[in-house]
Image: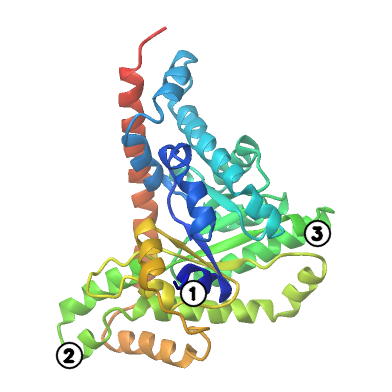
Amino acid sequence: MTDRLADLSAQGVSVWLDDISRERLRSGNLADLVAGRHVVGVTSNPTIFSKAVEKGDAYDAQIADLKLREISMDGVIRYLMAYDIRWACDVLRPVFDRTGGEDGRVSIEVDPRMAKETSKTIAEATGLWWLVDRPNVMVKIPATEEGLPAITAATAVGVNVNVTLIFGLARYDAVMDAYLAGLEQARTAGLDLSSIHSVASFFVSRVDTEVDKRLDKIGTDDAAALRGKAGVANARLAYERYEAMVASARWQALEAAGAHRQRPLWASTGVKDPAYPDTLYVADLVAPETVNTMPEATLDAVADHGEFTGNAIGGTYDDSRRVLADLAGLGIAYDDVVGLLEAEGVQKFEDSYAQMVQSVQKQLDASPDA
């Protein structure tokens, strides 16, 4: 039987799971996915945690203990998340050791309410780094304008950063620059650059969702022909920029000093439109030195019928630029799309955090007093 996830891994793609819950951990499901589905990393976000807390009784005992200690709501949420992330880090530790720290990573996100506040984001990132206290944790910092200096500052003190909510190419350039600046500061401070890792999470399916909505409103044949093409084209052009970065003299000086490449991570890879193949954002973005973080449904689809024929990005850059040019010709402004998606992304995570607060509060209210 073909092991399609093994084939994908052999193409240089690290398979990460875009989900975590205490039930997944205590049932052994995550360990099973690591052992049998070639999962070598985990990502989380406020939406994922909100859904996890709402289901079942996995968090009840810890919430009751935290209530007795009269911990603040923000503190309760940090403790709940850190517990799960620390546990997942321990499950992935053998992968971390086997890959020299390249994989075996588990991500925890800073409080999304701080996305527009640089100093608070820096403090939160370092605080989560200390709280989880595992070498294979990554702290997710959003790629907002205010997040860019936080990426540099966190990297400069040795925090492993997963940069999230990247939608546009110019912002991706700024993210790579922020990482390199952090490494340069770390080198000046005498830190061991070989201990610092990072990924840059470039979102894919949400681009198609927004662009397709605009194409449908236009309603012409030319517009219909472009449906489902923007997300992949945009991500492929991001990879072109990644290749240019690692070829630069600035990067090569850092690499010679022991630095690790900030790998592109394809996020939001679950297909939203059922008209598209359910493995679209995996098969069309196969390339060396990339990560694809998948919801479990996409992971299952890839395992069942994913087809990979080598590097799917190399040689596509002119066609990808043509897709974006054709969209512009129809009046779809690229900067407007990616700017809207970033704002919506931050708002969605804020809303999920608020929902998680409500869910935790209900459980706190239901817990017996001392």
Q: Quadrant of residue 64?
A: top left
Position above or below: 245 against 314: above
Residue lying at 58% horizontally and 45% vertically, measured from the top left: 91
Q: Is disc 1 surrounded by few (<14), some (14 to 19) or many (20+) residues within 10 Å?
A: some
Q: Position of residue 119 (x, y in %)?
A: 58, 44
- Give whichever of discs 1 and 2 has the lower sequence position: 1
Which structural element holds mark 3?
A: helix
Q: Amino acid at mark 1?
A: Leu
Left or right: where 179 falls relative to 87: right
Q: Position of residue 309 (x, y in %)?
A: 48, 84
**Labels in figure, total:** 3
Residue designated by label 3: 187
Left or right: where 47 falls relative to 78: left
Which structural element holds mark 2?
A: helix
Residue lying at 48% horizontally and 48% vertically, measured from the top left: 30
Asked if one can make out residue 98 in the rendered structure from this viewpoint, the answer is yes
Q: Are marks 1 and 2 in contact (CB under 8 Å)?
A: no
Q: Is disc 2 surrounded by few (<14), some (14 to 19) or many (20+) residues within 10 Å?
A: few
Residue designated by label 2: 221
Q: Nearer the viewer, mark 3 or mark 2?
A: 2
Which structural element holds mark 1?
A: helix
Residue designated by label 1: 169
Residue lying at 54% horizontally and 36% vertically, measured from the top left: 82
